[in-house]
Image: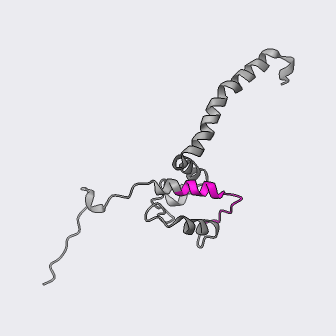
């Protein structure tokens, strides 16, 4: 499709691109201004949720959103993991994106204590006489 041969299509395309530019700019700005939200997008994009759960609560992989390691330790492990986790080099996952994923995990609330969930049975302690 040659847009220059059909001025109507050219103006329609330019109009559409002009109308979309604030949306695209806002999307780019929101990634930069909200690392937690961007980290969640990246957590999903790179498939972290498949092993670690939707918010890092654990699954087939360990819980990484609870008792979060310091960023430096997480960074070292993500680049050179032991076990079944694949390595994520900086070519695959930039340091900035890894920091945003860390911000997402850091923003997760602490899990509730099992004692605070009424439907869970309470352990019965035997008297030790």
Who is closer to the viewer here, 126 or 73? 73
| Residue 106 rendering spot, x and y as whole percentages | 47, 57
Q: Residue furthest front?
A: 33
On the rendered image, what quadrant is the C terminus found in?
bottom left
- At 38% from the left and 58% from the top, the residue drawn is 110
In this picture, residue 103 sits left or right of residue 45 = left
- At 46% from the left and 60% from the top, the residue drawn is 65
Q: Residue furthest top?
A: 8
| Residue 103 rendering spot, x and y as whole percentages | 52, 55
Q: Residue furthest bottom?
A: 129
Occupied quadrant, residue 57: bottom left
Occupied quadrant, residue 79: bottom right
Total numbered badges shown on the rendered structure:
0
Please state the extent of the stretch shown in magenta in the rendering.
Answer: 85-102
| Residue 68 rendering spot, x and y as whole percentages | 47, 64
| Residue 11 rendering spot, x and y as whole percentages | 76, 18
């Amino acid at each position: 499709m040659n847009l220059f041969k059909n001025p109507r299509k050219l103006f329609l395309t330019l109009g559409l691109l002009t109308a979309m530019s604030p949306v695209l700019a806002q999307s780019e700005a929101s990634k930069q201004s909200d690392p937690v939200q961007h980290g969640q997008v990246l957590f999903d994009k790179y498939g972290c949720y498949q092993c670690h759960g939707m918010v890092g609560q654990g699954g087939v992989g360990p819980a990484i959103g609870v008792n979060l390691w310091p960023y430096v330790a997480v960074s070292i492990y993500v680049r050179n993991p032991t076990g079944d986790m694949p390595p994520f080099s900086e070519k695959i996952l930039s340091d900035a994106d890894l920091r945003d994923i860390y911000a997402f995990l850091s923003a997760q609330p602490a899990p509730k204590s099992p004692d605070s969930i009424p439907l869970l049975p309470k352990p019965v302690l035997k008297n030790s006489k």
